[in-house]
Image (spheres, rainbow, N blue to C red):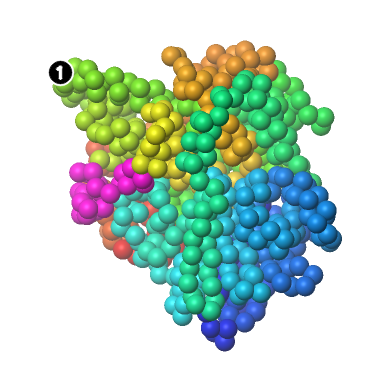
Amino acid sequence: MCGICGFAYADREHPVSEAVLDAMMEAIEHRGPDAGGARLGPGLALGHRRLRVIDPCGGVQPMSDADDLAVLTYNGEIYNFRALRSDLESAGWRFRTNSDTEVLLAGYLTWGLKVLQRLEGMFAFALWDRRQERLILARDRLGVKPLYWAQLAGAGLGFASELTSLIEHPGVERRVDRDALAKYLAFGHVSGDASMLVGVERLSPGTYLTWDRASGAIERGVYWDMSAAWREAQQRPAPSLEEFQACLEDAVLKRLVSDVPLGAFLSGGLDSSTVVALMRQQPRSVVETFSIGFDEATFDESPWARRAASELGCNHHEQRSEVRSPELLMEVADRLDEPVADTSIIPTYALSKMARQQITVALSGDGGDELLAGYVTHRADRYYRFARVFGGLPVKLGLRLMRLFSDGRGKVNVRFKARQFLESVALDPVAAHASWRKLASVPLLTELTGNRESGERIFEPYHTAYGDSAGLNPLDRMLYVDYKTWLLDDILVKVDRASMAHGLEVRSPFLDHRLLELCAGLPAEKKLGALHGKVMLREAARGLVPDFVLRRPKRGFNAPVASWIDGPWRDLFDQTIKSPDSAWSSILRPETVRRLLDQHRRGQRDHGHLLFSVFLLDRWMTRVGARG
């Protein structure tokens, strides 16, 4: 896994600053601590930071072919690179390294952009085609690896793996996008192709972008359409349990290819335990597994992880990290290239830091919930449809009862969730689904930002995904929405930034696009049952994982920030929220934010997640020099 960056201009004589490229590369050094490389040419600069995983001695980047027809800077892993290499060798290609980087380069020179349809993996890359003088950017099907880009003055284009790298180019403006800000405050992450900065976009998953030097024209293309793949899957016979098992086993096997130490994250839940159990079936040494514990028993999964590791015969590493320390919070905040207020980023960061002391590559269970309806929100959607039919008086009565109780923290938070559900019944299906994870209502967003229009647009990415999934059954439509919003903009960003901050590569078999296409053809009852989700996975895992794993309820990997704001983080939040010079006060209304903190401290309302998002926003704005 690596970090990439660069820029190009239409004018070949445009000055190319090596200092700017160096600054961009330095900003992502954590993504590739092993080596760095640069390629400068007329009006062109390509940079690379490398984490050696495949062919440590070869695969130096930026890489060009023997005839220097193209230059590639690439971040990711192509899991089927050996099969592609064999095909290319049959076509006459002679390889100089054993890297997947050279396979990707040779694939493009042989098949052109059609190589994208042959790739199985997670990747983001930039390729300069010297023959046509065009720059090509591409991103993997599900968006596991990040890629930002922006148009530059002088008909130029810049790109980078992380936003803090791209803004090192003086042509990128550091002004906060108000629509993106509203989405961030509403959900804890930015949704859609926009970034937190005006003029900077994220390349969509499954797409590529070409920039032509002669004309300065930018064209976008789609090489994989999830909605089309989903519909095609439903035209085929439903896959059997044996087909599902074989596909999942193959996805795990392909992710075990590594020339450096490899292990797995293990929570003791169904997804990670299944991945580890399949790893144990391979002819390899004992699997190294890693977990982290909390002092708060409500959030602590370490006993389950320990038990699962013992029964699966793993060499388990556990750490009860001081994840609530102000020092760790500041460290996490200062590593984010864009604010992501998912509270689980703190334990994910600590877990990655611990694991990196032993391994360079970790397998995880990410993606299993989106694949087979594992979230409680999917059951809430079912209750929502029931409530819409039998709504009216029962819903109004429920809301009246909820208003009798405080919205404080701890156990009272259950009442807050109940109210959130009851209020969602008045919304359309996709807005209701998004609301299960919403941190702030549109009226509160308006009060916070003074911009009602941006607040009213927070559901746009969800409605776009919902529209693209027309024709699918209600459950599959919401799973599709999750792939395009929650998974893409929250889960994958959180895991990538938390792990790559330590130079740790994380791979998830459940994010295999072939597995997604197979599961898209499953009937709804094989995903969401009467009592729980992931029905097909439970059937496949029976006899593979310990029985207790199948019985235990799902528990999210979240941090209890609501109590920490009043405890170990108290002084830090007082300093940030109450200071008249805080960066956030230039784009949010101070009196509203301070009122939220006061209500939280009094136990009147649980604003923990929203205050956490304001804190991260402030740290990010201060660090990158962003303005309103």
Q: Residue at x 71, y 36 (%)?
A: 263
Q: Nearer the viewer, residue 233 or 512?
A: 233
Start and end of the magenta stretch? Answer: 442-464
Q: Secondary structure at mark 1?
A: helix
Above or below, comparing residue 280 to residue 353 in the picture: above
Can you name the residue that lies furthest to the bottom here? Answer: 13
Residue 173 place in picture, x, y as percent: 40, 70
Above or below, comparing residue 25 to residue 297 in the picture: below
254 left or right of 158 in image: right
Q: Residue at x 40, y 28 (%)?
A: 473
Above or below, comparing residue 194 to residue 396 in the picture: below
Magenta-colored stretch includes residue 453? yes
Residue 249 shows in the view: yes
Magenta-colored stretch includes residue 400? no
Amino acid at dot 1:
Leu
Q: For mark 1, what is the residue? A: 393
195 left or right of 14 in image: left
Q: Nearer the viewer, residue 287 or 463?
A: 463
611 left or right of 476 in image: left
Residue 580 place in picture, x, y as percent: 27, 58
